[in-house]
Image (tube, rainbow, N blue to C red):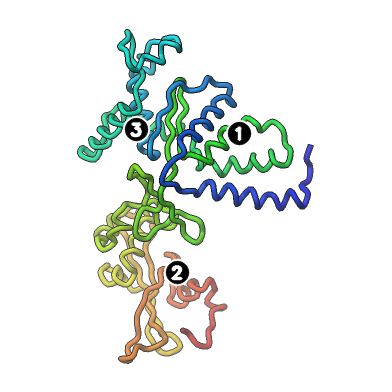
C-alpha cells in the first residue's frame, strides 16, 4: 500500500498532468479511424462487453449524437424494444447486401445521409422531429467523451504509473482519448467522432475567441465562448449588432455583462439611461463619475455600474480621453470604484500621480 509519495513520484504528477492536458486540448483535421476503432474495441473488452459488430464514424459531437439517434430510431421501437431480428453472426456479415425478414444493418453511407437530412431539417425548421430530438438530447448525456475524459483519466493514469494495481481496465478508454473525440457504446454498434479542428483558450485556460468559434469541429458544429462562457454567435462575430435594447432585454446577468463589454462600456453608457450615483475629481482636477444602469427584468437586483474617468495624459489637442471601468453593483462612491479596480480599499489607494 502506498501511503506517501516519493519526490520522484511527486515530480511525475506534473509530467502526467502536462501529457493529459496535451491530449485533452488536441486538435486534428482527420481521425486515425483504425487506431480509434482498436481502442474502442479494447474499451468494450475491458468492460467485459461483447465488441461492437458495426462501427460508425461522425465528424463531431452533434453529428455523433444525431447518428446515435438515427441508429436507435432505426433499430428500436418507441418503447425501446428492438426492431432488428437477432440473426447469427455468420448471417449478419451478408445481411447488408441481402434482404432478410428483419432489418438489415445500416451502412455508414445510409447513416451519414440520414444525419445530413436531419441536420438540414433542423436548419430550415429550427427543430428536429420529436423522437429524434429526444434521442439526440439523451445521447449527449451518456457519451464517452474521448479526449475530454482527460481530467479524470489523468488521475488514474498517475496512480497506475506509480504501481497501484487494478486500473488495467481503463486502458481502452485511455487509448481512445489519444485518438478520438466523443464516442457512444451500444450493444451491437458504436459511433466514434473526430477531435475538434480548432480550439482557442484565454490566458486562464478557458474557451475563448474574439472572432470565431472557440471550439469547432469539421461538421461545422462548435461553441462561441467569451472567457469560458457560452454565448450566441453574433456576440462574437458581429458585436456591432449589440445595442442597449438587446442588453436591457437580456435576463442572464453574466451574458449581459459580456454584451456590454463587447458593445463597449463607453458606447453603452452613452446610449443607456444611466443614473449618476456619485462624482468627484481626481488629483489633476479632472471629473470622475459613477454611473448605474438598472434593468427592469432583473429579478436578482444585479445592475451595471461603471466609473467614468479621464486619461491623466492629454491628447495632442489638449483633450483627455474618457473611459469607463466596470465596477461591482455594491460600489457606492467613485473613490471606492477606482480603488476596487486596483484591488485595493479607498484607504490603500493613495497614488501620488495617476497614469
Residue 163, image quadrant: top right
The percent coordinates of residue 51 (x first, y second) are 51, 22
Callout 3 crowding tier (Cα within 10 Å): few <14, some 14–19, many ≥20: many
The percent coordinates of residue 137 (x first, y second) are 37, 33
Q: Disc 3 designates what residue?
A: 66
Circle 1 or circle 3, nearest the eye: 1
In the image, residue 244 sits, relative to residue 140, either above or below, namely below
Q: Secondary structure at mark 1?
A: helix
Q: Disc 1 designates what residue?
A: 171
| N-term mark: 2 or 1 | 1
Circles 2 and 3: CB distance less than 8 Å? no
Q: Disc 2 designates what residue?
A: 331
Q: Which residue is painted at 75% across and 51% down in the image? A: 8
Q: Secondary structure at mark 3?
A: helix
Q: Is residue 161 left or right of residue 63?
A: right
| N-term mark: 1 or 3 | 3
Q: Secondary structure at mark 2?
A: loop
Amino acid at each position: 500500500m502506498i501511503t506517501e509519495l516519493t519526490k520522484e513520484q511527486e515530480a511525475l504528477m506534473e509530467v502526467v498532468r502536462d501529457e493529459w492536458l496535451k491530449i485533452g486540448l488536441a486538435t486534428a483535421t482527420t481521425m486515425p479511424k483504425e487506431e480509434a476503432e482498436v481502442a474502442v474495441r479494447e474499451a468494450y473488452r475491458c468492460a467485459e462487453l461483447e465488441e461492437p459488430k458495426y462501427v460508425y464514424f461522425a465528424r463531431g459531437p452533434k453529428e455523433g449524437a444525431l447518428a446515435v439517434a438515427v441508429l436507435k430510431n432505426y433499430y428500436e421501437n418507441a418503447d425501446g424494444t428492438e426492431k432488428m431480428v437477432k440473426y447469427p453472426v455468420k448471417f449478419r456479415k451478408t445481411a447488408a447486401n441481402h434482404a432478410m425478414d428483419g432489418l438489415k444493418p445500416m451502412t455508414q453511407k445510409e447513416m451519414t445521409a440520414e444525419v445530413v437530412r436531419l441536420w438540414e431539417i433542423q436548419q430550415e425548421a429550427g427543430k428536429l422531429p420529436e423522437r429524434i430530438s429526444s434521442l439526440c438530447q439523451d445521447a449527449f448525456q451518456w457519451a464517452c467523451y474521448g479526449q475530454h475524459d482527460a481530467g479524470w483519466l489523468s488521475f488514474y493514469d498517475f496512480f497506475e504509473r506509480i504501481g497501484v494495481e487494478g486500473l488495467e481496465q481503463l486502458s481502452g478508454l485511455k487509448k481512445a482519448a489519444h485518438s478520438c473525440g466523443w464516442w457512444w457504446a451500444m450493444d451491437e454498434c458504436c459511433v466514434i467522432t473526430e477531435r475538434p479542428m480548432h480550439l482557442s483558450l484565454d490566458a486562464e485556460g478557458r474557451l475563448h475567441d474574439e472572432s470565431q468559434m472557440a471550439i469547432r469541429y469539421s461538421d461545422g458544429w462548435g461553441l462561441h465562448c467569451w472567457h469560458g462562457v457560452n454565448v450566441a454567435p453574433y456576440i462574437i462575430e458581429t458585436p456591432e449588432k449589440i445595442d442597449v435594447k438587446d442588453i436591457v432585454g437580456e435576463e442572464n446577468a453574466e451574458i449581459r455583462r459580456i454584451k456590454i463589454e463587447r458593445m463597449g462600456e463607453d458606447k453603452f453608457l452613452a446610449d443607456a439611461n444611466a443614473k449618476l450615483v456619485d462624482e468627484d475629481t481626481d488629483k489633476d482636477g479632472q471629473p470622475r463619475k459613477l454611473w448605474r444602469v438598472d434593468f427592469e427584468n432583473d429579478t436578482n437586483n444585479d445592475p451595471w455600474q461603471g466609473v467614468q474617468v479621464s486619461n491623466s495624459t492629454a491628447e495632442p489637442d489638449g483633450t483627455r480621453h474618457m473611459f469607463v471601468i466596470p465596477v461591482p453593483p455594491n460600489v457606492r462612491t467613485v473613490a471606492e470604484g477606482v480603488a476596487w479596480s486596483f484591488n485595493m480599499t479607498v484607504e490603500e489607494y493613495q497614488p501620488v500621480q495617476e497614469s
